[in-house]
Structures are given as structure tokens and as C-alpha cells.
Image (spheres, coloured by chain):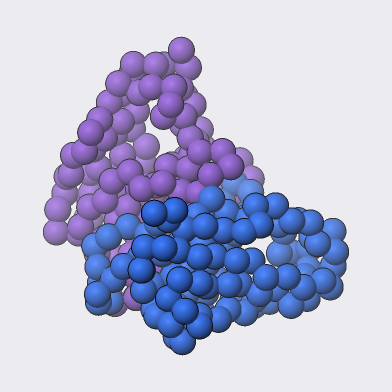
Amino acid sequence: GESVGLHLPTLSVQEGDNSIINCAYSNSASDYFIWYKQESGKGPQFIIDIRSNMDKRQGQRVTVLLNKTVKHLSLQIAATQPGDSAVYFCAERVRGGYNKLIFGAGTRLAVHP
Amino acid sequence: NAGVTQTPKFRILKIGQSMTLQCTQDMNHNYMYWYRQDPGMGLKLIYYSVGAGITDKGEVPNGYNVSRSTTEDFPLRLELAAPSQTSVYFCASLFAPGQATNQPQHFGDGTRLSIL
């Protein structure tokens, strides 16, 4: 999900398909990563996280993959549902920074029936 | 627990007016954060606090002030509102026993502020 200003990149999928949302993070010193979901008019909601000493973590219907070599993070959503429609943000925590997060620009996921 | 509560939800200000955005959390979290989110963008850190009486600047602090007199409350103050401060403001909190705690921040639902 690269930043394009006012126009968020959008991923359109059919209900039941798998979704993959990508994120390039900025700092090789980041040691903790989080995916958040943001529905219209709401604050970011935690989905899943991963530490830098891992390359994969699974939750319920979601998987996060971390590739530190190319500073890339992805969120996989299995069997995407209409309720998954939202904007998804990745966030990175730089080591030693009082748990401050750096957010990506976000990707809009649109799920069609 | 109510979590992180922000008030008001919406506000329109005139240029040069001042206001305070309220944020309170009932989770006994020591760390609190203020972000702004401009249309189609990610969140940018304005100020943060690691405990009562301790605050520090984030990435975009100009035009804002904060205070942290209690663990629960972390108000954000705009002294001379400018059109560039039109944004959605989010408050977040976290319990962190140290500088690096592998826990996500918890967010409120935001204050939508327009300055005309």
C-alpha cells in the first residue's frame, strides 16, 4: 500500500476469495509490527501483530507475513466477508522509541457479494 | 471498561479560536498518544506521554499542546486554530512496563475537527 495522497489504493475482491494486503515499512530498526482495521467513522482496531524475530503469525482467518530482507509486511485474509470491508493500516515500532508507531498510508479493501 | 473515550465527536471552529480535545481511558494505561489523520492518509503522531506529568513531542507537534495531570486523562489543546489543523484526531493508550512492550495501542473513535 503506497501512499497516493487523497486516493487510497483499493483492493477489490469477491466475497469468499482470499485477500492479500501489502505494506512496505520504512525502518530496518523496527522490531514490532501491527495491522489495524479502520471502519468508516471509527478508530483503528487491532487485527494481528508480529515481532521481528518471526516471519509468520496466524490468527483467526488472518495471517501476517514479515520479510525483513526487503522490509515488507503482508496481511492475508481468508474467505473474505463483506464485514471485512475497511481501510487496513500497517504500523511499525522503531526499537527504543517509547512504543511509538509509524503508520503506513493504508489500503482500502472492498468486498463485493 | 469503556476503553478510550474521546469528546467531542465533531466540532467546527473558526480560524483563531481555541479548543481542547478530551481523551480519557479507564484501563490504567501509562502510555498515551495523540495522532492526526488527514484524508486518505495514515496517522501521524502529535504528542505522547509515558506517564502522569511526562509528555513529549511527536512528528507534528506545532500548533498543539498537551498535559497529563492524571493517568486517565490526556487532553490536546489547540490555541490558535488554523485551516491546516482540519483533520480527524485520535487518542490511543497502551500499558507498557518498559520502553518496548509487544502490545498494540488501543484507539478511541476520534474527534472530527473542521476549521473554517
Kindly indicate which chain is depicted in purple in the rendered structure: A
Classify residue A58 as left or right of residue A85: left
Quadrant of the frame with the N terminus of chain B? bottom left
Is B35 above or below relative to A18?
Answer: below
Q: Is residue A72 visible?
A: no
Which residue sits at x=84%, y=59%? B116
Task: Pick the residue in front: A35 or A23.
Answer: A35
Name the outermost residue toward the front: B1
Coordinates of residue A28 in the picture (x, y in percent): 28, 65
Task: Pick the residue in front: A69 or A75.
Answer: A75
Q: Chain B is shown in which shade?
A: blue
Which residue sits at x=34%, y=28%? A19
Classify residue B28 as left or right of residue A40: left
Coordinates of residue A42 in the picture (x, y in percent): 53, 44
Q: Quadrant of residue B84?
A: bottom right
Coordinates of residue B81 in the picture (x, y in percent): 77, 70
Coordinates of residue A93 in the picture (x, y in percent): 33, 65
Is B35 above or below relative to A6?
Answer: below
Which residue sits at x=32%, y=57%? B104
